Every structure is written in structure tokens, then in C-alpha cells.
Amino acid sequence: MTRPVSAPYRVTATVVALLGLSAAAPFLYRTGPVGYAALLVPLGLLLALAWLIRLGQWMLAAGAPPWPARLTLHLAQSPQAQQRGRAVRVADAVGRTSDFDATPAGYAVWAVLQRGSAPLLNQRVVWERWLRELTGEQRVLVRRRAGVAVLDVEGRGRIWPSSFTLRRRPWGVALTPLGGTSAGNDLSWWRLLTVVVLVVALLAGPAVGRGDHLDAVWAAVYVVVLAFGVGQWFGVMPPGRQSGQKSAGSARIPGPRAEPAKPHRGGRFTGTSKTRKR
């Protein structure tokens, strides 16, 4: 079993790859026209700059004195239909009629920290492979500085932040505890691969048509690296079944049906609501 690469190494490699690919772009476009793939360079440089600032915050927070807290991981889900806009509610209604749900059930991982009677702290975190097993409440050591908090889970490892620490719930999403039956992750490898292939075809297709294969390879690699960096920035949970959830193929064995409660004569009425109506 391969040892997972921690977030600082992954992010550093992503930043180096984005800077290197961006620096190679001018040399590729000297012999050919500038295509749509050139639009990736500003996005890649902006993401690399944002990650460099975040890496500096990580270094400062890692040196802060620790304090204990209780951690519960959550998945950020789309809010209920009645809490969203009219256009989204219409899309939900159309999706239900065609048996298709276009909204993901859960995509980003948030850490909710509680320390005594202090207000809850909410923070989006970078995904780690072992986070699937952190269901329920966990005891952690929090190192907070420069607007972010680094979380040390005993016996597991360190959780790195991908957003600022908030004293409020994040806007536009509903947080559901990780491992709950209603906190599923609809992101699949096929759906992710389809999106990446479509973007690569759109940006690298013109280069292939004019025979510039080196430009096409550069665009394809840039799309993959950029998507990986964006996924880490938003704490996206990759495809896979969460710990504590049953697989789709597992059969559920029905238990015995409970007998309806009957009222006792001369005593207090303890029947169900249906019995009361009767």
C-alpha cells in the first residue's frame, strides 16, 4: 500500500508545475497562432499565487501554540430546494421528472471546531485519503495563526486548511456530518473524466487540427494540473465510498414489523396518532 503524499508536497508540486508550464507557453506560441489554451495561463498564474500565499499561512499556523478542540468533519451540500433561487428550483423539478439530479450531494470537506462554550469555527480543509474514516467527533490540537488553523489528529496526521477560519457557517451550502447517510458524494470518476476530456478537446483540439502536437500536449497537461490545483483549493472530496456507508449492492434485510400499540382500558391512552383517530 502506497504511502499518501501530504498536502504541502502536493500543493508545492502543483505550484511548480503551473509556473513551469506557464513559463513554457511563450516558446510554444512563437511558431503558431495563440489558441484558446492561452486563456489557461492567467488562471494558472492566479492559482499559483493564491497557493503561495496559502503556503505562507500554513507555515505561520504550524508554528503557533496548540490548544485542544473537538472536530467534526462535514460535507458541504447544496441547500434544500425551498432555500434556493427560483431557477434552481425549476431545474430540480425538471431533473426529478427526467430522473436526473444535476446537483452534487456533497463536494467540499469542512471542519467544524468546538472549544468549550466558544463559538464554533468553520474551515474548509484540503482533502487527505484518511479523512474518509474520521466520522463522528474527534479530539484534535488546533494551531491557529494568520487567519487559518492547522489541525493535528492524534494517530492520524495533520489536516491543512484551504480557506480562512470562519466564525459563521459558510454561505450558500448546508453542512452535513461526514459519514451520514444523507451526505453522499455524487462525484464519480466517469463524470470527472468526462469534464476533463471535454475541456481538453475544446482547448487542444485546434492545435491537433493544425498539426501542432506539442501545443496540444501542453494544453492537456495544463488542464489536468489546473484541475488538480483547483480541486485541492476547494477541498473537493474525490470519488469513493465514505466510511460507515453501505455499498450500493448491499441488500437490506427487513426486520419484523412492530405491532401497533393498543390503548389500555382504564389507564392512560398510549396509542399512536392513527389509533387516536379511530
Image (spheres, grey):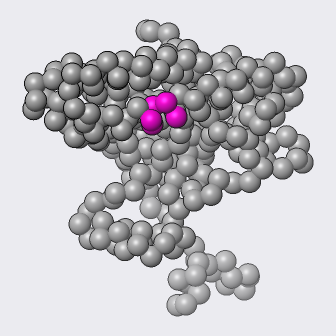
Which residue: 90% across, 48% down? Answer: 117
Residue 88 seen in the current view: yes
Q: Is residue 157 left or right of residue 90?
A: right
Give residue 124's position: percent from left, percent from top. Answer: 63, 40
Of residues 258 and 249, the one nearer the viewer is 249
Residue 275 at what x, y percent from top left? 55, 83
Task: Point out residue 68 in the picture as x, y percentages from the top left corner.
Answer: 84, 30
> Main SS type for the magenta part?
helix
Give the quadrant of residue 188: top left
Does 52 sit above or below residue 83? above
- Asked whether 44 falls inside the magenta stretch, the response is yes
Asked whether residue 139 appears in the rendered view, the answer is no
Specify the farthest residue to the front.
30
User: In this orientation, which residue lies closer to the viewer: 146 or 247?
Assistant: 146
Q: In this picture, which residue range is highlighted in magenta?
A: 42-46
Q: Quadrant of the N terminus?
A: top left
In the image, 254 versus 115, the foreground residue is: 115
Q: Quadrant of residue 155?
A: top right
Question: Residue placed at 55% from the left, 90% from the top?
Answer: 277
Q: Is residue 65 magenta?
A: no
Of 31 and 252, nearer the camera is 31
Q: Residue at x 50, y 10 (%)?
A: 3
Q: Position of residue 105 (x, y in %)?
A: 45, 52
